[in-house]
Image (cartoon, coloured by chain):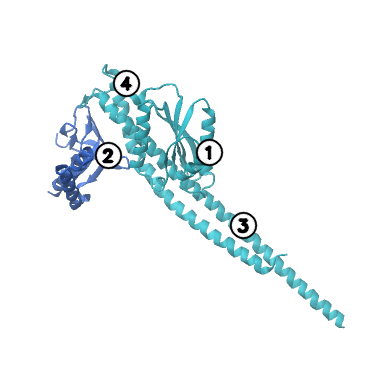
Amino acid sequence: MADELFEFELATPERLVLREKVSEVQLPARDGYIGVLPGHAPLLSEMASGYVCYTSAGRRYYMAVNGGFIEVLPDHVRVLADTAEKAEEIDVQRAEASLKRAQERLTNPNIGLDVARALSALHRAQARLDAAKAGAH
Amino acid sequence: MPSLIDIRRRIRSVKNTQQITKAMKMVSAAKLRRAQERVIAARPYAGLLRKMLANVAGAVVSSESAGVNPLLSAREERRIQLILITGEKGLAGAFNSNAIKASLRFAEERAGASLEFVLLGRKGRDFYRKRNAAIRGEHTGIMNKVLYADAAGIAREAAERFAQEEIDAVYVLYNEFRSAASQKLTVSRVLPVELPAGQSPTEYIFEQAPDQILGRLLPRYLEVEIYRAMLESAAAEHAARMTAMDAATSNAAEMIDNLTLYMNRVRQASITKEIIEVVSGAAAAE
């Protein structure tokens, strides 16, 4: 099983981020993370904010993603992400700052606060930090 | 007859213009390359989305729970929204006027329906402003740098109005990028969405209900279609400007040649005249 591979494609509207043969993928589906190994049953899901982790040639890579869709086929995984960033490209300080800002906004809500927007900003920043932290190991 | 100095001045002015058109041509060529790369980079997402949509559509059609999605409902086209994509600047040959003319033709063909415009790019906006057309939305300055977020905003508004049945169809009119030398005007209907033909339906595990996923995919599909049209139009605009400026540069070269020839002739004529004067003066003195 270990040396079996499948194709993993990840695209954003602007560009194709990744097309690689991988042996394992973890994805942030909307109802929780799912792990995909070769020969997975066909599956369709929306994607939440979080990190994508894939194993290629024995190494793990991380990526922060935000919203989109997941399609799993036995020999193929397609991810359509709204945004995607590789772990090493993430600006940790900026992500921390925006996380703090979003938390403050939610703990001391002003009148006219767009809660949905603040929450999604919070999730986005959290996803970036998670990916960066996981990628650093 | 103009004096030598006048002609020289004229030549210098044409040369200056030629330098400008040449520079504009090179700038357009560089921008075209970048725009082309973006068109190509956006293709995989669109392709994957279409495949996914086809697969989901197959599953939704076969399941009984399918509530028909509002973005799919085809009805008589009485109120039409036309999204017209033009450029921000002129000096691109017939690029903008072709698009505007095509939109007028489009309006003529659908004289029975009421038409509203969403105008992307300053040129189309300026034209329809003067004509008192029903302008639903105008977006200027966004064609300089095509952003997905802009396309998404336009798509969202169109989808909302379509779902509320305020409009019955949405068309996009834009210049499609064929090659550096040719653009093709394209009108395509983006709403109601026509589902791509599904292959043999795969038995999926759906984490969410199929029609719910379809409901999320469709607006995204619309966004991507509009984004693609904007990218194509931007690339086509640079291509058109490059061609126009190339033609202008060679016209200027031709003009300079003609003027130089004329200048030489004038100079020769004046020299000849002077010689005749000298000779005839000498002859009179003998």
Residue found at the very far front of the displayed protein: A111
Picture residue at 27% right of the left edge, 16% below the top = B64
Q: Nearer the viewer, mark 3 or mark 1?
A: 1
Residue picked out by circle 4: B68
Q: Is residue B21 visible?
A: yes
Please report whichever mark, 3 or 1, sits nearer to the chain's N-terminal start. 1
Q: Which is nearer the eye, B192 or B51?
A: B192
Do the residues at discs 3 and 1 belong to one chain?
A: yes
Dot label at residue B254: 3
Depth order, front residue of B42/B223 = B223
Query: Which kind of residue does numbered mark 1 sit on?
Result: Arg
View extreme (left): residue: A137
Q: Mark 4 or mark 3, which has the lower sequence index?
A: 4
Residue A82: mark: 2
Q: Residue at x 16, y 48 (%)?
A: A100
Measured along the vertical axis of the image, is residue A125 above or below residue B112? below
Q: Given the image, on which type of amino acid does mark 4 rest? A: Val
Q: Nearer the viewer, mark 2 or mark 3?
A: 2
Check the image and report above or below for B254 versus B99.
below
Chain A visual colour: blue
